[in-house]
Amino acid sequence: MPIHKKGKRITDAEVKEVLALLDRGKSKSAVARETGISQSKVYRLWSDKLARDADERAIQQREEEDRKRPCVQHVFIREIIKEDSPKTVATSRTEKIIEVKRCRLCGFEERRSRFHQIN
Ligand SMILES: [Zn+2]
């Protein structure tokens, strides 16, 4: 029994039904017959779906390529980590200062440490 009444707007449920039937390999004319939706509309819905799928694939591919590409210029965030050195040199205490520069985009890290004397 056709679910669609001629002249009425095609509902989301009907669109889903049409795409599901086509996905199962039914011909467009068979789907049109079954649902009562005109064949030209069935064609349109299907090509819209294919276009959406292609767009999605293109976006995914672009995102993947973006992830693989190294930064042209890293965007560093600087972080200073101070560590009290357990060793004491003579009367002065040394403090280890680690400077971490981490790229916000790709996660590349650069560490530099130096010792700083506190008298
Ligand atoms: Zn980077």
Image (cartoon, rainbow, N blue to C red):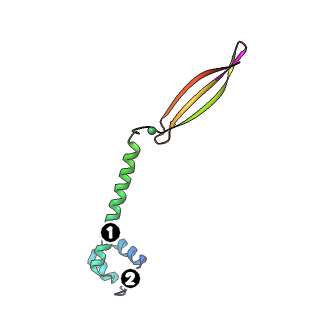
Query: Could you tell me the amino acid type at mark 1?
Result: Asp
> Can you give x and y, in whole percent of width and height, for residue 102 in the image?
51, 36
**Res. 117 mark:** none
Does 55 appear above or below 110? below
Q: Residues within 10 Å of mark 2 (few under 14, many from 20)?
A: few
- Looking at the rendered structure, the secondary structure element under dot 2 is loop
Q: Amino acid at mark 2?
A: Arg
Which residue range is magenta in the image? Answer: 89-95
Residue drawn at point x = 39 percent, y = 78 percent: 14
Residue at the far front in the pictured view: 119
Residue occupied by mark 1: 48
Among numbered discs 1 and 2, the one appearing first in the sequence: 2
Q: Which residue is mark 2?
A: 9
Mark 1, Cα crowd under 10 Å, few <14 / some 14-19 / many 20+, is few
Give the position of the N terminus as an image quadrant.
bottom left
> At 58% across and 22% down in the image, what residue appears?
114
State yes or no: discs 1 and 2 in contact (Cβ < 8 Å): no
Q: CA distance from mark 1 to mark 2?
A: 17 Å
